[in-house]
Amino acid sequence: MRLSRSSRLARGGLLASAVLSILVSIPSSGATAAPRVPHETHPITDRHGDDLELNGTASMITRNTGKRVIQVTTGGYKQIGSAWSTDKVDLDRSFSTSFKAFLHHNRPAGDGIAFLAQGHGPRALGGWGGGLGYRGIRKSVAIEFDTFQNSSDPDSNHLAVVLGGNPDRHHKAVTAPIPLYGKPFRARITYDAGAHRLRVYVQGLYRTAKERLMLDEKVDVARWAGVREGWLGFTGATGDRVSHQDVYDWTVDAPKA
């Protein structure tokens, strides 16, 4: 793992109290469920990214539509970027997150993005190309949205759960039912800490699109992150193939550490 010297911490307190909400823990299957308490999903990318740490090529920009976007890579060769919420999360408890992504530029393109829960810190940054920006971030659980087929990949349009920061070894990989490149999509990730269940859903952004469950894996997130209190965020990379890789409308419901 490498730490980016170009790391930039966006200052300000506008979102300091509103980035992550505290969830009531989801009970295990044998426990009596507590009354459901309504909670609020907090947006992270709607304003100026005051609670984001941006590393490498990652930056917070405003598109022509006025949408605030984390641009993880900018269309250059061998780029690496990462963006982490600076508020730590209790990874021993349940959380959920959703975001939209638009990976676009040239065809064929590379290499994709990943959502991570990790225990290294808000300056974590990994390898370029097939490393998807997280290779070497060993204390982590990564969910890949991969748009380039390397030797260990099933194809050039797949999702995968990867443990231990090694994208050459998939815990589970599946072909995506929608294009991950060239068209925007929405992803939703839920973690049931009581059952150690990680679920990943994807959905196209067109009127008749339906959300589909793509991954449903038994993973102890806190164990693989190596810490009880860790960080959530994104990495992305390019290699000999390039792309603009944007993440927006990112919201998190998680127990704040």
Image (cartoon, rainbow, N blue to C red):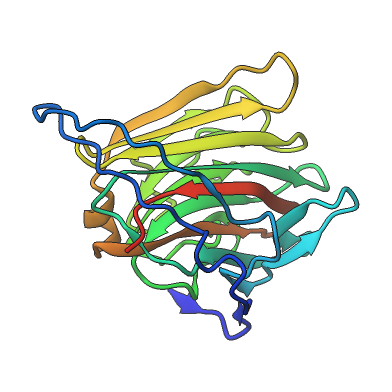
**Where is residue 224, by image quadrant?**
bottom left
In this view, the residue in front, 114 or 35, is: 35
Q: Residue furthest top?
A: 208
Image coordinates of residue 202 in percent, x first then y, are: 56, 29
Q: Residue furthest bottom?
A: 5
Image quadrant containing the C terminus: bottom left
Residue in the picture at 53% in, 69% down? 16
Q: Is residue 188 left or right of residue 140?
A: right
Image coordinates of residue 69 in percent, x first then y, are: 73, 55
**Where is residue 57, by image quadrant?**
bottom right
Is residue 215 positioned above or below 125 on the image? above
In this view, the residue in front, 124 or 13, is: 13
Residue 141 visible in image: yes
Q: Is residue 208 left or right of residue 217?
A: right
Image quadrant containing the N terminus: bottom left
Residue 243 visible in image: no
Residue in the picture at 50% in, 33% down? 154
Q: Is residue 202 left or right of residue 49?
A: left
Q: Residue furthest right?
A: 64
Q: How many marks?
A: 0
Is residue 8 positioned above or below 167 on the image? below
Image coordinates of residue 205 in percent, x first then y, are: 71, 28
Residue in the picture at 42% in, 50% down? 142
In this view, the residue in front, 76 or 186, is: 186
Q: Is residue 142 left or right of residue 155?
A: left
Image coordinates of residue 225 in percent, x first then y, are: 30, 60
